[in-house]
Image (spheres, rainbow, N blue to C red):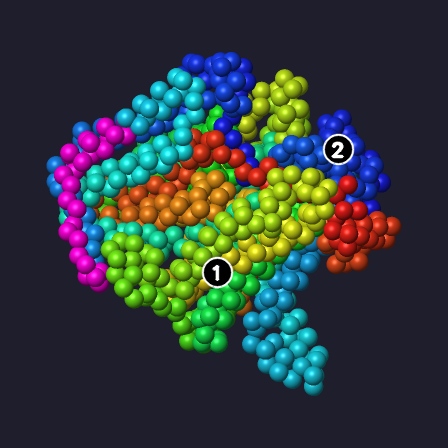
Amino acid sequence: MSTTVSSSKPGKPQPGGKGPDTRAAAVSAKPVTWKTPVLLTAFGLVALVFFGLLAPTQTASFGISTGSDFFQLPAVEVNAFAGGLVLSILLLGLSGYAVYLKTKDRHVPGWLTVAFIVLFTAAFLIWVVGGARTPSISLAGLIAGSVTLAVPLVFGSLSGVLCERVGVVNIAIEGQLLGGAFTAAIVASVTQNPLIGLLAAAVAGAVVSMVLALFSIKYLVNQIIVGVVLNVLVSGVTGFLFSTVMQEDSDRFNSPPGLDAIEIPVLSGIPIIGPILFRQSLVGYLMYIAVLVVWVGLFKTRWGLRVRAVGEHPQAADTLGINVNATRFWNVTLGGAVAGIGGSFFTLVAIDSFTKEISGGRGFIALAALIFGRWNPIGAFFAALLFGFADNLQSIVTIIGTPVPSQFMAMLPYLVTVLAVAGLVGKSRGPAASGIPYVKG
Amino acid sequence: MPEKHPPKHAANEPAGNAQEATSADESTAAVVSVDTAGGAMEPSAVPATAQSGQLPGGPDTLLRRIFTGSGMVSVLAVLLALIIGGLLIASTDERVATAAGYFLARPTDFLTAVWDAATRSYLALFQGSVFNPRGNSVAAQFAPFMETLTIATPLITAGLGVALAFRAGLFNIGAQGQIIVAGILAAWVGFALHLPLGLHLLLVLVAGIIGGAFWGGLVGLLKARTGAHEVILTIMFNYIALYFLRYLLNTPAFQRPGEANPISPILDPTAVYPQIFGTQYRLHLGFLLAIAATVVVWWLLNRSTVGFEFRAVGANPKAAQTAGINVSRSTILVMALAGGLAGMSGVAQVAGTEKVLTDGVAATYGFDAITVALLGRSTPWGTFAAGLLFGAFRAGAVQMQIQTGTPIDIVLVVQSLIVLFIAAPPLVRAIFGLNPRRRKPARAARSREAATTGGAA
């Protein structure tokens, strides 16, 4: 996925009528486009009309503390109309600043986009909750649930980061998650030990990845083709074995013991961040560790430098004595293992048995998170959190009864991704050699 | 080996000529470097092999492209996939497990059990998809084949859409969403409007094609304007279309009156495809349209200026732009056409097979279409043949599950294995020991050398 580049077609007027002038070219290599300012302004106006002017007049209430916290905070109450108006004016302010920057031929800084997304999400939340039948939700529950739902996404997108940074496009994340989930369930059931199940899930993900690596590196088959086909293959194999083996004797083969949440005393009682950081299952803690390890590994170690060199310019890396294809093979395998652990989350933590297609397309969302997060482990982590948040919000707003049809809430992550790849992350680009097989000589 | 055969359409396949003379391995490497200009630029989404519809080193005549493109390898790939599928079936068979218990005492029992388990399932698959000798009339005996053609219809048209996009270097994962949007529009015209016979069906078809073309064209537009990757876009558009359909099926405009389930009213009799071989078969006019679509796509790709532009863009977008081809326009147009073709599948579903709109309107046809196009090597007639094959798998799998209890999922396994093996001819040749000796060892030695020297040599 290396072509998410903001392209301004030469010889074409920019949307908005202003062509890049010579001064812009002097300031930066890439011309400043109207895309981001226009998008932000459009969203600001949407916020103003819907979340501000057309907002319900109820008071939205957001619970912060849960019963198990060691000190209690009062719930935050916001008048939906006033809150929406204030936030949407702030949003318009931000988009106005973006437009101002554009007139000065300067890029919109990253913090502005992030701040915009956060404020927009807040305004949206106030609007949704304010219009609900029972205008009150637990913010702590919402955030904790988001992190839970994001766990497989984070692992999946880390797998994508590891593969794409080394120059192999990994569309097979879905298959790796599914393979991990299946293997974790069956191995943990047979051995009655969730830790062995977790380990087996990593192996299963790695095996799926090895097939990807073998076909794309040795046989030079297009990486996207292998990825797409592997998803079908894993879905077929796990579905087949589920119907023939697991359903025949589900007590023996499909009742894995779960990984329970491990609570860290005192710290887990901190409101909001307590449950998400200090009351997680083993897989949850592994997620935080994995994000940090991959980030440090990729950007602070010799190994990471080599990996990135192979992903950016394999010829140069080869010239310097790095074995390009071996590096690729083992990194892709490692990525698969990471995704496999993410898959075990489905059967060892979230649900206590395997069902067909249990990963339900989350591998593709992980792929989107990877791009949204700009091929960076930390970025991918936050992007995955955003998607987890949207996922969780959807089920919560269905319960509290909001005017927005739940199908549109479910659609939200995908719409956001389209906007992200089409506009907001337009500046970012993937590793240069991602998707290109390396043939020596 | 196929290199001997002279290319019949050499003039139409300029990219192919250079590859004919080279050996398979060299041409694989050549393809990669053609694709990336020696690594200096990004590759298009689809390798040049898939775009030109050619195997490395393969000839390019029409007949050979359908069955024998690199015929031996294709047949062996299918065989290999069936063998692995058979082993998977046998591995979960009870009699096999019993026989394995005394394998050392009587190994023949075990092998017989394996053979029986696999062949029983595949025989049921064949009887469910081609010919059922137990039917009490000729019509009933060929009913499975008619069912195969019925199921192949949406696979062929959607597969053509995917294949067309491949040829222009675009990876269209979005057939699923395009089928859904086409289904929505076609179904609405079918049950909400009441028009005279003929005109009504025509409008249903047009609405479906426009729906698919819109959904596909939107991806093309976004890609051309913003540079966003079409793989991500199409995957996301699939989900957006699905949730939009689910929303619509809960609105009064689409939900059948007096029905709690998300299901649309039945389409008017004037809005559905006539059944071409009488009412005892589900086979409908859509199949003939699928044949027509195959002819049109073949003409478009091989005989028209637009098709030449598509292939040029697919082979090398930068060169195409330099040569004066409007790459943006080609991208938008090819995605719209691909969407329109997938839209025909949506129409075949709502106006042919199902006659109502549900949220399962696209089933998995959109995803299967990708494997169909890959197996068909992105050529129109190859895709047609692959569509028939996968249609047969789908139709037969139902019968197989009823008769032998083998889950339908085995079809997914066999399908994906076929595509994997066909995409990697060297692997298949190696497994069957067909690799020409003069090429393979030289290459292996080189890579071993590279491994030992860390690539520095």
Disc 2 target residue = B16
Q: Is residue A251 above or below residue B126?
A: below
- Mark 2: few/some/many CA within 10 Å (<14, 14-19, 20+): many
Q: Nearer the viewer, residue A338 or B251?
A: A338
Is A218 situated left or right of A183 in this image? right
Give the residue drawn at x 61%, y 76%. Answer: B96
- Mark 1: few/some/many CA within 10 Å (<14, 14-19, 20+): many
Q: Give, as a three-letter code, the residue at label 2.
A: Gly
Residue range corresponding to the magenta coloring: A67-92
Q: Nearer the viewer, residue B123 or B250?
A: B250
Q: Give, as a three-letter code, the residue at label 1.
A: Ile
Q: Residue B220 lies in magenta, yes or no?
A: no
The quadrant where residue A373 appears: top left
**In this view, which residue lies farthest toward the right?**
B438
Q: Position of residue A272 (x, y in %)?
A: 26, 53
Q: Nearer the viewer, residue A143 or B150?
A: A143
Q: Position of residue A432 (x, y in %)?
A: 60, 37
Give the residue drawn at x 54%, y 38%. Answer: A430
Q: Position of residue A104 (x, y in %)?
A: 40, 18
* Labelled disc at residue A341: 1
Is A131 situated left or right of B157 in this image? left
Pointer 1 chain? A
Residue B289 seen: no
Q: Could you tell me which secondary element the residue under label 2 belongs to?
A: helix
The CA span between labels 1 and 2 is 44 Å
